[in-house]
Image (tube, coloured by chain):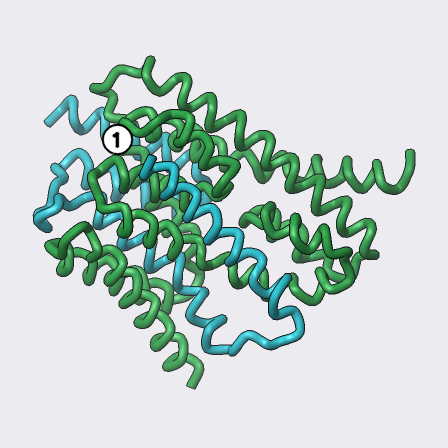
Amino acid sequence: MSELIAVLVVGLGSYLFRSFFIIALANRRIPDRALVALRFVAPAVMAALIVALMTDAEGNVAIGVPEATALLVGGAVASRSRNHIWTLFAGMTVFWVARALL
Amino acid sequence: MSVDRSVARQGVIDALPLFVPAVPFGLVIGLASADSGMNLLVGWSSSWIVFAGAAQLTLISLLGSGAALVAAVGTALVVNARHLMYSAALAPTFQRQPPWFRRLGPYLLIDQVFALVSVRPEEEPDRFRTYYLAVGATFWSLWLVVTALGIVIGPVIPEEWNLEFAVPILFIGLLILGIDRWPKVVAAVAGAATTYLAAGLPNRTGLLVGAGVGILAGTLAEMYRGE
């Protein structure tokens, strides 16, 4: 039940973000500083999420060499290929191979 | 062929190649739902209730990792806050649209739809609306199918494959692909470092603190750069 509420709240919030200026404030200007800040939402949150997923609830690093290697390779492949499919393929392959070898 | 049909067809054709990179996301969301132990129907329903890959993946993986509800919801909402930008950018174009479309359109306003329609702001309103709906409906229907597929194949895949590790790899991809200027590197580094330092905060709220510090650091770096 609480999961459904979580999904509904995120769904409602997402709709409000997407409709906010279109419906409510169509003729008002969004402050430039707010627009600048919004540009940094994605990199800040993605980096924070990666760290959160790689640490346990006490704040200890919860990954080994295979995971760290796979993340580095995934990042390198993403920056070269600019492609999610290659990133996923390379990252998971390195993860499995490193885990089997180490 | 009427103009409407040709515009709609163009929308579908334009949407298909952009959907390809979203396929692994959709599958991993399905897999993560199956892996997180959450009700599968609820996990899949996020595809049409939330309809945003990164936010869905954030919510499902955080709930699955035992984060508190408020931290998972808060982080997923922060992930989607970027949609405010899209709303602001398209608001003038939507002023020429009927009220029903001003209400429905935002529901379909995901990254890829924005990317395709934002280059057509001067389009005649009927054509713009038809194109927008065709692009949005294409993504929406494919998204529901792909995430359902992930849920179906999720339980069949052996646990020792550790496919849940695909989540941080996809996030690394999103991070790297989104970086086009050094203030974004500042935002990412500050966000990551703060989250690490604040990881001991209760209910994984360190994540929200990290995201906030990262956004602030990036904004300050951009202002410094602009001076």
- Please count the marks in the image: 1
Task: Determine the residue located farthest toward the front in the rendered image.
Answer: A1
Label 1, on which residue? A94
Examine the rendering and report whether any part of residue B55 can be seen: yes
Q: Is residue B178 or residue B202 the one in the foreground?
A: B202
Judged from this view, the residue extending furthest toward the top is B156
Q: Could you say which chain is coloured cyan in the image? A: A
Chain coloured green here: B
**x and y, in percent, of residue B221 in the image:** 35, 75
Answer left or right for B78 relative to B112. Answer: left
Q: Secondary structure at mark 1?
A: helix
For the point 70% across and 36% down, the residue is B12
Judged left or right of residue B62, residue B81 is: right
Kindly indicate the quadrant of the structure image that contains residue B138: top right
Relative to B184, A28 lies left or right: right
Q: Quadrant of residue B182?
A: bottom left
- Position above or below: B17 against B93: above
Q: Residue at x 78, y 62 (%)?
A: B96
The subunit carrying tag 1 is: A
Residue at x-position 55% and y-position 74%: A30
Residue B47: percent from left, percent from top: 48, 35
Residue B212 on image: x %, y %: 30, 65
Give the quadrant of the N terminus of chain B: top right
